[in-house]
């Protein structure tokens, strides 16, 4: 949260646009904050947020829909935002989920091609547990850039944990500054 993950992703997508690359941006249907775009946000001193930049995206609701988009083969760059919100499969023991398996298959098929896959997401949830397909996607990655936020309690530059401000216990609760704070390990309070 608030580490500029989507801002960094949008910057890379703009570079790809300048290079004339065909881009497919997807986001999970669980991310209900925006409909047909991904957005970077700025937090204001009063705790509110505003959108600072955006990029068009397709909301993916299912494995079948994702496969249709991949089969169209009209992209040189695949960007995935909020990847942690894509579900894992209850009947499969892997940490990839259908999103991760689709990414792995693309990597295998496109070995000789210049396909670029960019993924942005949280690696852990509010309880410091691995989040969705992110552990599997991290294992597949050739390079990883792990961003950190500024701790909203002490101002440390090493906030990499998401403090949920409500008592909600479900792993997925979509929200911004009204529901979460970026915290360093010293200021983080694990849920009880």
Image (cartoon, rainbow, N blue to C red):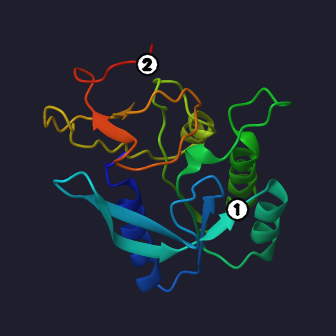
Q: Residue furthest top?
A: 192
**Residue bearing mark 2:** 191
Residue 9 occupies quadrant: bottom left
> x%, y% of residue 43?
25, 56
Per the image, the residue denoted by label 1 is: 60
- The mark lying in front, picked from 1 and 2, is 2
Residue 182 quadrant: top left
For mark 2, give the secondary structure: loop
**Is 152 left or right of 179, judged from the image as shown?**
left
Figure check: 17 above or below 77: below
Q: What is the secondary structure assignment of the residue under circle 1? A: strand
Mark 1, Cα crowd under 10 Å, few <14 / some 14-19 / many 20+, is some
Is residue 113 visible in the rendered image? The answer is no
Spatial CA distance of label 1 from label 2 is 31 Å
**Residue at 46 percent of width and 49 percent of height:** 175
- The x and y percentages for residue 56 are 53, 77
Which of the image's four quarters has the N terminus?
top left
> Residue at left 59%, top 81%?
22
């Amino acid at each position: 949260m608030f580490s500029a993950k989507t801002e960094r992703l949008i910057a890379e997508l703009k570079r790809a646009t300048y290079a004339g690359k065909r881009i497919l941006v997807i986001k999970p249907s669980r991310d209900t904050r925006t409909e047909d775009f991904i957005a970077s946000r700025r937090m204001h001193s009063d705790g509110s947020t505003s959108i600072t930049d955006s990029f068009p995206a397709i909301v993916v609701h299912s494995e079948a829909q994702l496969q249709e988009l991949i089969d169209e083969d009209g992209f040189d760059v695949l960007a995935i935002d909020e990847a942690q919100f894509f579900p894992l499969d209850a009947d499969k023991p892997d940490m990839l989920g259908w999103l991760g398996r689709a990414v792995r298959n693309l990597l295998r098929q496109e070995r000789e091609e210049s396909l670029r896959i960019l993924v942005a997401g949280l690696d852990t949830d509010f309880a410091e547990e691995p989040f969705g397909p992110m552990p599997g996607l991290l294992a597949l990655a050739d390079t990883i850039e792990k961003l950190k936020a500024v701790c909203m309690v002490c101002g440390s530059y090493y906030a990499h944990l998401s403090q949920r401000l409500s008592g909600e216990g479900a792993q997925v609760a979509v929200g911004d500054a009204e529901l979460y704070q970026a915290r360093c390990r010293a200021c983080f309070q694990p849920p009880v």
